Amino acid sequence: MGNYIVSARKYRPGTFTSVVGQAHVTNTLKSAILMDQLAHAFLFSGPRGVGKTTCARILAKAINCENLQEDGEPCNACESCDSYNQGKSINIHELDAASNNSVDDIRNLIEQTRYVPTAGKKSVYIIDEVHMLSQAAFNAFLKTLEEPPEHVLFILATTEKHKILPTILSRCQKFDFRRIRVDDIANHLEYISKEEEIEYEYAALQQIALKADGALRDALSLYDQLVSYSTGALTFQAVLENLNILDYEYYFKAVDLIQEANHGQLLLDLNEVIEKGFEAKDFIAGLTEHFRNLLICQEPQTIKLLETSENVKQRYEEQSKALSPSFLLNAFQMVSEAEQQTKRATHPRLVVELVLIKLAHLNSAINLARLNHTSDQPEKKKLIPR
């Protein structure tokens, strides 16, 4: 099998600077280290795969680093850093609360905190998925978390902050990790591709980033999978095929056909999509998102909410300018309702076909309603001066 290492492990950040998309957290942690104003307990919360455990490990390493850099980064060269990088550190302890969630597990951890480290400044305890601890375990942990020994620091990580007791939350310094932006993930994948000498299309990397939905670890797993499947370059088309994603070209074309009132071709295109292995509800879900993106492009200040490549963003802007706000609002409402109906319908395809036909004649309905409204307005009486 060789010594293959997945990208998520091989390119796991070893410094704060190399953490992707969490500068608001890493900058604060570096400042706290340099000013020697570290709290006794931290809580890192946020979605999966955004760097919570990674930042906890870097923080633990920096605290015990024997040659801390001027910018607050660990040197990754001293004995303490080297021992941790090799998995031999006796000062940094990790506990997975998902499988060690009983009160006895926490009591054993509390017992360990009594021992002063023989080397290094602090004993750091990283508790991952801390929300999985039982009620009794949380209660047993409270006193130690509030007043731990001077040589002990706790770092708690969780994806479900709302499940943690308020009494635990109040004893921690809290950091909220964000979903990572599409461009940040794509740029990181580009860096890995260059390091591994893998040919790629940037649009393919962006599509992987979109599919990952803000989780870098998910993006790296998808990236490894697609690199294994592709015999040559990592292309946009290969990503669409392997991840079973419907090409956005179908949606741009669908809106053009709606504007032309060509419901016949709309139905033929839907049939083509279904013959490719997609379901009608997949198509309507994508069309809903497409109309949402077009609505966002109606206002210049909201275009930044659109997470896609620059060339696709430009196409959204161009198509949005050709559509009236009233059309977009009505269309968005219609496809949203149709998407919900497909989840309950016995024959989802019929629901989608019906809404496509209605959309093709939506402009006519809007114009007719506007004419009726105008004709119903009473003529203003001319004022005759006395």
Image: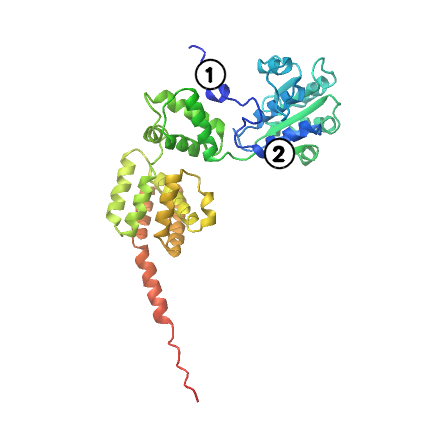
Mark 1 belongs to which amino acid?
Answer: Ile
Per the image, label 2 sits on a secondary structure element best described as: strand
Question: Residue at horizontal 39%, vertical 45%?
Answer: 288
Q: Nearer the viewer, residue 28 or 42?
A: 28
Q: Nearer the viewer, residue 278 or 27?
A: 27
Q: Nearer the viewer, residue 204 or 278?
A: 204
| Position of 145 relative to 327 (above/below) | above
**In the image, is 198 to the left or to the right of 11?**
left
Residue 382 visible in the shown view: yes
Q: Earlier in the sequence, mark 2 or mark 1?
A: 1
Quick one: quadrant of the N terminus?
top left
Mark 2 belongs to which amino acid?
Answer: Phe
| Position of 127 relative to 384 (above/below) | above
**Residue situated furthest top in the rendering:** 2
Q: Which mark is residue 175?
A: 2
**CA separation in Å, label 2 and label 1:** 30 Å
Residue 202's spot in the image, x, y percent? 38, 31
Give the colour scheme shown.
Answer: rainbow
Per the image, label 1 sits on a secondary structure element best described as: loop
The residue beneath circle 1 is 5
Q: Quadrant of residue 141?
A: top right
Residue 30's spot in the image, x, y percent? 63, 28
**Residue situated furthest bottom in the rendering:** 386
Question: Residue at horizontal 68%, vertical 27%?
Answer: 34
Q: Which mark is residue 45?
A: none
Residue 384's spot in the image, x, y percent? 41, 85
Q: Quadrant of residue 313?
A: top left
Quick one: quadrant of the C terminus?
bottom left
Residue 347 visible in the shown view: no
